[in-house]
Image (cartoon, helix red, strand yellow):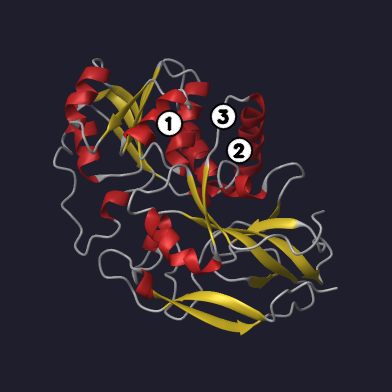
């Protein structure tokens, strides 16, 4: 039986490519009929949309690790939803699932996503659905692989994380602490975010880039240099970190949110010769290259959550019409933890 609620499928589509800062007017709200699944497919009613800074890059008509969102296409996003109709043997009505479903009420899928190489996954019993979009979702997995497989964090490391109050940075810093880092310092914007890092997540210190001199604070907090820097920001933060790295330090480039909305890309790091002087290793990575090990990551993350060693936080806004505005919160520094939008309650009893 189909539980579709409304007979229309509300969608947010890309109307125009942003020039500089993304705006709400770059998206257009439309309504289509609710799609019908074919053989081997199932219909999902979306409940939560997830937002991450990388989505901004998908709006640019440039070559990247995935094709850009096309004009007129439903805005791409990872979501949690409920199966409401199925012609697929492995997915039953009532089950909660997560996948790249986009900013819309309903989506039809065969359970595979070739774009980001993330197949539709079922939400484990006993796990809040929104958690599968945060600590146990793409951002948590990014933190896990970036800190462990790419950064090689180990006991005794002095670790720095930028964008530390975001969904990825907050988990990355906690993983470093779990793995025995002697010092974990986060960079974030504002006293509330910095207090959350130190008071709740166990960071040893936090630097408020809005009110403090980052370079001076790094010199004081890391007298022997930073062994591992997990960077989500780039720009001047990366420049300051380069001046304060330890010999043979490692830098993991996860993102560069400081430049995502620039109309003209700024010059590269001024202090790039520190890579030579300090014999640094700098490496970028993308989550899709590690999805074959997703089960390992989710197992470890789930264990740390259950033991209380790892804490997650979701910033949940409400209402389908708030999708563009919620996306903008990422670039205004308004979110703490994972930015989500709740768009519906499950229409069927949850299995």
Calculate the distance from the C-alpha at mark 1 to the C-alpha at mark 2: 24 Å
Question: Which element is circle 3 on?
Answer: loop
| Pointer 2 local density, CA inside 10 Å: few below 14, some 14–19, many at least 20 | many
Vertical order, 131 against 205 (above or below): below
Calculate the distance from the C-alpha at mark 2 to the C-alpha at mark 3: 13 Å
Question: Which element is circle 2 on?
Answer: helix
Identified at 13% across, 42% down, the residue is: 270
Provide the residue designation for mark 2.
297
| Quarter of the image where one finds residue 156 | top left
Identified at 80% across, 60% down, the residue is: 94
| Residue 310, numbered circle | 3
| Residue 196, numbered circle | 1
| Quarter of the image where one finds residue 104 | bottom right
| Pointer 3 local density, CA inside 10 Å: few below 14, some 14–19, many at least 20 | many
Q: Please state if 322 lies on the left or on the right of 10 as rendered.
A: left
Identified at 18% across, 29% down, the residue is: 215
Residue 182 x %, y %:
41, 15
Q: Nearer the viewer, mark 2 or mark 3?
A: 3
Question: Which element is circle 1 on?
Answer: helix
Q: Nearer the viewer, residue 228 or 201?
A: 201
Q: Nearer the viewer, residue 307 or 333?
A: 333
**If you read the primary sequence from the N terminus, does the residue marked by circle 3 or circle 1 appear first?**
1
Q: Are marks 2 and 3 in contact (CB under 8 Å)?
A: no
Q: Please state if 313 lies on the left or on the right of 218 as rendered.
A: right
Q: Nearer the viewer, mark 3 or mark 1?
A: 1
| Quarter of the image where one finds residue 95 | bottom right
Residue 313 x %, y %:
53, 40
Identified at 69% across, 81% down, the residue is: 7
| Residue 72, numbered circle | none
**If you read the primary sequence from the N terminus, does the residue marked by circle 1 or circle 2 appear first?**
1
Vertical order, 251 against 36 (above or below): above
Is residue 299 in view from this perspective?
Answer: yes
């Amino acid at each position: 039986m189909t539980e579709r609620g409304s007979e229309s499928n509300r969608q947010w589509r890309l109307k125009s490519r942003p020039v500089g800062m993304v705006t709400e007017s770059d998206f257009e709200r439309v309504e289509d009929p609710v799609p019908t699944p074919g053989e081997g497919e199932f219909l999902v009613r979306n409940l939560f949309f997830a937002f991450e800074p990388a989505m901004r890059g998908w709006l640019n008509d440039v070559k990247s690790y995935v094709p850009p969102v096309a004009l007129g296409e439903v805005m791409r996003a990872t979501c949690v939803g409920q199966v409401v109709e199925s012609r697929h043997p492995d997915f039953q009505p009532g089950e909660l699932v997560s996948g790249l479903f986009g900013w819309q009420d309903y989506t039809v899928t065969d359970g595979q996503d070739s774009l980001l190489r993330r197949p539709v996954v079922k939400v484990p019993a006993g796990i809040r659905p929104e958690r599968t979009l945060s600590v146990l979702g793409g951002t948590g997995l990014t933190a896990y692989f970036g800190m462990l497989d790419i950064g090689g964090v180990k006991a005794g490391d002095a670790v720095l994380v930028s964008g530390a109050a975001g969904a990825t940075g907050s988990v990355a810093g906690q993983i470093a602490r779990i793995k025995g880092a002697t010092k974990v310092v986060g960079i974030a914007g504002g006293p509330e975010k910095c207090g959350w890092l130190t008071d709740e997540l166990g960071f040893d210190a936090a630097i408020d880039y809005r009110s403090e001199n980052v370079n001076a604070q790094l010199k004081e907090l890391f007298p022997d240099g930073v062994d591992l820097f997990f960077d989500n920001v780039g720009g001047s933060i990366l420049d300051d970190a380069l001046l304060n790295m330890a010999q043979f330090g490692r830098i993991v480039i996860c993102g560069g949110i400081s430049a995502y909305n620039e109309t003209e890309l700024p010059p590269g790091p001024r202090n790039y010769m520190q890579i030579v002087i300090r014999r640094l290793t700098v490496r970028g990575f993308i989550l899709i290259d590690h999805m074959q090990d997703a089960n390992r990551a989710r197992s470890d993350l789930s264990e740390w959550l259950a033991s209380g060693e790892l804490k997650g936080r979701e910033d949940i806004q409400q209402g389908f019409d708030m999708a563009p505005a919620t996306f903008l919160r990422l670039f205004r520094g308004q979110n703490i933890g994972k930015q989500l939008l709740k768009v519906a309650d499950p229409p069927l009893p949850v299995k």
